[in-house]
Amino acid sequence: MTLVAGLRAAGYGVPFQPVGGVHGSELAALNGWQAIRDPYGSGQEVYVIPAISPDVAVIHVHEIDELGNARVYGSPFWDHAITRAAKRVLVTAEKLVSTEALSAQPELTLIPAFMVEAAAVVPNGAWPGSMPNAYDIDYPGVESYLKDAPGALEAHLARAPEAQGGAR
């Protein structure tokens, strides 16, 4: 929640975002977060998380149209917050769809075209991770990526969808 609060602050154009649930942990001290007293008079203190503005956000989505409007099916987790906070947004997508298809339900568009600097269609681009409602995590793929052995990374990359012609 603190990471999302920092991203939201940047996306909203404010220097910080209040967040609950930090009291009693060492997170505030470790990160140098400050607490402020409720300006509306409750007397409660709340920690405020400084704005986090990444230089670049790279997001993998279900669909993108030729203009760059991007759609995620299911929960966008922190994709919404990070795309609003980042200085530049790059998108990879499972598939290209028509603008007309996205226009039928514009409220489902997570990232509007004007925010997208560049895009590429990369089927299975979240591999070895998952793409909700499309494919699950490839646990053996993740495990191969984590191996600390000579040639492990090269072997992992050889199994990647783009090395297999995009299909997996």
Image: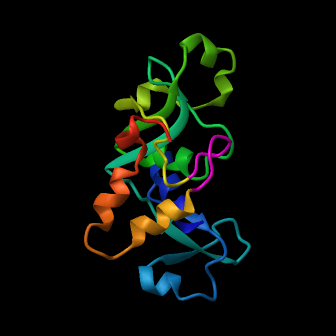
Residue 43, position as x, y percentages in the image: 70, 78
Residue 41, position as x, y percentages in the image: 71, 70
| Nearer to the camera, 60 or 48 | 60
Residue 23, position as x, y percentages in the image: 63, 83
- Compared with 14, 147 (above or below) is below
| Nearer to the camera, 145 or 120 | 145
Q: Is residue 13 visible?
A: no
Residue 10, position as x, y percentages in the image: 45, 52
User: Quadrant of residue 63 in the image?
Assistant: top right
Q: Horizontal placement of 122 versus 75: left or right?
A: left
- Residue beneath the point at 66% across and 37% down: 73
Is residue 95 a member of the stretch shown in magenta? no
- Residue beneath the point at 52% across and 64% down: 140
How many numbered discs, if any? 0
- Compared with 122, 55 (above or below) is below
Is residue 135 a member of the stretch shown in magenta? yes
Most common secondary structure along the magenta stretch = loop
- The quadrant in which the N terminus is found is bottom right
Q: Residue lying farthest top?
A: 100
| Nearer to the camera, 93 or 128 | 128
| Image: magenta residue range | 130-137
